[in-house]
Image (tube, rainbow, N blue to C red):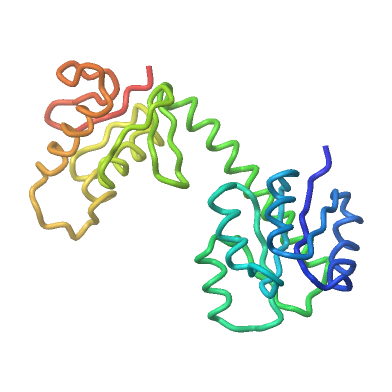
Amino acid sequence: MKRKVLIVDDESSIRSFIKIGFERSDFKIIEAVTGEEGLDLARTHRPDIVVLDIMLPGIDGFEVCNVLRTEFPEMGIIMLTARDLDMDRIMGLEKGADDYVVKPFNPLELVLRAEALLRRIDIQDIQKREYKALASPFKIDTYSQRVFKNSTEIELTPKEYQIMDLFIKNPDKLFSRNEIVDALWGSDFMGDLKIVDVNIRRLRKRIEDDPQNPKFIETVWGIGYRWRSK
C-alpha cells in the first residue's frame, strides 16, 4: 500500500515543487490550500505524513499542527517556513511537529526526512505492540503516559507511572530499592529508601486484583521488586 502525504501550502508552485520528490518515491499525494482544508483532508484520508506550511490563509500552520497532534498522535508532521527563526522552530515543536524545514529547500532532502520519520514511527509501532503484549492485561500509552488495564484507564501519579513503566519494560528483572531510586529519583537522592516501598504499595492498590496477594509486582525479600510476566 502506498504511503500518503498531505501537502498543506497556499502556493501552488511550492506544492508542485514538493510533489516532484514524493511522486518519485511512490507516495500518494493529497493537497490542501488552507488550514481548514488541511484538517478536513487529514481526517478523511489519514495521511502518514503531513508537510505543513506555517503561513496559511485562515488558521495558521501552528494551530493546524496542534489540532493534528491532538487528534492523530502518531501522524508524522514536518513544518515548512520561509523564515529561519528559532522562535518559529520552538513554536512548531511545542505544537507537536516532528521536524522542521526552512525554505528554500531541496525536495529530495524533504522526502528523505519524511522517510526517516516514517521509519521511526514504524519502529515505535512495533515497540508499542511488543510493549502491550509483555504487559498483558495492561496497555501503556507512552505518548500520553496513561495506563489501561483491560481497556479501563488506571489513574496513577507520575511516580507510579514511572515505576510501572520501568517494570513492564524490564519483565522478570529484579530491581533493588537502590536501583529503583536511582532510575526514578536520581543517584543524588538523599531521602529514605522506604519511599520505594510506599509507592509500590500504592501502585499495587491501583493495579492488583488483590493487593495483599500481588500477581504482578513481586517482592523479593531483603532485595527489592520485580514484575512477574507469567
Along the line of sight, which residue is nearer the eye, 118 or 51?
Answer: 51
Q: Which corner quadrant holds the C terminus?
A: top left
Q: Is residue 57 left or right of residue 163?
A: right
Q: Residue at x 32, y 32 (%)?
A: 154
- Outermost residue toward the front? 58
Q: Residue at x 27, y 49 (%)?
A: 184
Q: Is residue 138 left or right of residue 4?
A: left
Q: Is residue 167 left or right of residue 5?
A: left
Q: Residue at x 89, y 73 (%)?
A: 13
- Counting every numbered tag in the picture gives 0
Q: Residue at x 83, y 42 (%)?
A: 2
Q: What x and y, as percent, mark residue 100?
A: 65, 69
User: In which quadrant of the rendered view does residue 22 lie?
Assistant: bottom right
Q: Is residue 93 above or below residue 29?
A: below
Q: Is residue 101 left or right of residue 191?
A: right
Along the line of sight, which residue is nearer the eye, 58 or 158?
Answer: 58
Q: Which corner quadrant holds the N terminus?
A: top right
Q: What x and y, as percent, mark residue 97?
A: 59, 62
Along the line of sight, which residue is nearer the eye, 105 or 31?
Answer: 31
Q: Is residue 19 above or below residue 131?
A: below
User: In which quadrant of the rendered view does residue 18 lie?
Assistant: bottom right
Q: Is residue 36 above or below residue 40?
A: below
User: In which quadrant of the rendered view does residue 8 lie?
Assistant: bottom right
Q: What x and y, as percent, mark residue 67?
A: 57, 56
Q: What x and y, as percent, mark residue 40?
A: 71, 51
